Image (spheres, helix red, strand yellow):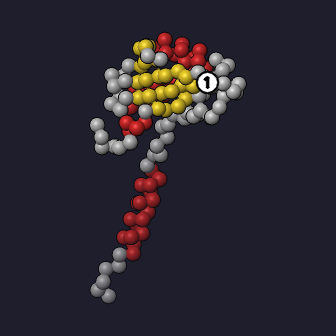
Amino acid sequence: MSELNITPLIDVLLVLLVMLMLSIPIATHKVEIDLPKAGSPNGEPPTINRLRLNANGQTIWNGKPLGGIELKTQLVAMARDPNRPQLHFETDARARYEEFDHLIATVKRSGVREIGFIGNHAFERWDQN
């Protein structure tokens, strides 16, 4: 027989492929949030607080810039409000992802349950600046 038997080579390559697939770590970084439901418990329209992250990384709460401690105080007070106000969160398209992720984690840790993302039209297309 003058032909090369490549069956063992294919077997070895398949074993190596499976080992590679098993050794690649699964991406597990995520921040889970609960999006608001329609309506409010007392039937009135909910109070809306607006949180904005601008391109410079500055956080703006209802139109005024706030630092880390002041923002946490506002978020904790909002989370304890029995009327369950909503937080509308908007991010500038040029803001850094690390700052966005840190801000979302801060909101989550403060106990805010009613959060909505607005202004997502800026992220419609990947190739726009």
The residue positioned farthest toward the bottom in the image shown: 1
> Which residue is disc 1 drawn over?
46
Number of numbered markers: 1
Residue displayed at 39% across by 70% down = 10
Point out the image quarter for the C terminus.
Answer: top left
Q: Is residue 92 left or right of residue 37?
A: left
Helix, strand or loop at label 1? It is loop
Residue displayed at 66% across by 28% down = 40
Kind of residue at badge 1: Pro
Q: Is residue 108 left or right of residue 2?
A: right
> Which is more toward the observer, 11 or 105?
105
Pinpoint residue 116: horizontal percent, then vertical percent. Answer: 53, 31
For residue 58, say whether it is visible: yes
> Which is more toward the observer, 86 or 23?
86
The residue positioned farthest toward the front in the image shown: 44
Residue displayed at 49% across by 11% down = 70
Compared to residue 65, the image places residue 44 above or below, namely: below
Pinpoint residue 87: horizontal percent, then vertical percent. Answer: 54, 25
Q: Residues within 10 Å of mark 1 (few under 14, many from 20)?
A: some
The residue positioned farthest toward the right in the image shown: 42
For residue 98, say whether it is visible: no
Compared to residue 27, the image places residue 109 above or below, namely: above
Pinpoint residue 53: horizontal percent, then vertical percent. Answer: 41, 24
Pinpoint residue 25: horizontal percent, then vertical percent. Answer: 45, 46
Residue displayed at 65% across by 31% down = 39
Point out the image quarter for the N terminus.
Answer: bottom left
